[in-house]
Amino acid sequence: MKSFEIIEKRKADLLTSLDQIDDDKLSYHPDEGKWNIIQIIQHVADAERGALNYCQKKIQAGDKMPNSPLGENARMILFNKFLKTKVRYKMPKGLKSPEDGLEYQEVCVGWYNTREALRKFLDSYPEKYLKKAIFKHPVAGRIGLNNMLLFFDAHLIHHKFQIERNLKSFQTL
């Protein structure tokens, strides 16, 4: 899927840039209660892992999965456009905050493993289910597989802004 290659490239570009940054900056909290860069990466990886786990469960319903709702693409275009802005908002209720004190390399390996599992899932995904709403996003509602991947891209862009803010606040110390 082309969408998967897009998110893989964006992840690789981000991690290549972060690999050059020392651990003090990666674990720096810009303010009390704010996530450090490692936590941001962990959050993105957790969101993708949770979505994949959900899809792996839902695919078992096969033909009984609901069809993608009318207006899904338009709704997701608007939602993703919003995510790609620098507007800040709180994480949807019910999602857990990432742990503190994690090692950067450990988080990256976990994200890599999630993406590899996602690649395998996509490779085996039956084409006849592409019009099915396999994922239920906590804000956007039921969406199909391709829109889930487009959400992953917008979600990463959104958190890249947060990473950039963290790096700027560290530089002003």
Image (cartoon, grey):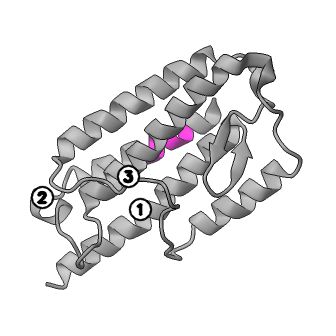
Residue 154 location in percent, x, y? 56, 56
Q: Which residues are magenta?
A: 5-11
- On residue 22, the disc is 2
In front: label 3 or label 1: 3
Residue 76 location in percent, x, y? 72, 54
Distance Cα–Cα, label 2 vs label 1: 17 Å
Mark 2 or mark 1, which has the lower sequence index? 2
Is residue 28 highlighted in magenta?
Answer: no
Extreme-front residue of the structure = 94
Horizontally, residue 16 falls left or right of residue 170, namely right
* Location of mark 3 (residue): 43
Q: Depth check: 168 or 97 in front?
A: 97
Q: Quadrant of residue 31?
A: bottom left
**On-image quarter of the C terminus:** bottom left
Q: Are marks 2 and 3 in contact (CB under 8 Å)?
A: no
Distance Cα–Cα, label 2 vs label 3: 20 Å
Is residue 9 highlighted in magenta?
Answer: yes
- Please, what secondary structure does the residue beneath circle 2 have? loop
Q: How many numbered marks appear?
A: 3
- On residue 160, the disc is 1
Mark 3 or mark 1, which has the lower sequence index? 3
Horizontally, residue 83 falls left or right of residue 115, namely right
Using the image, determine if residue 80 lies above or below residue 133.
below
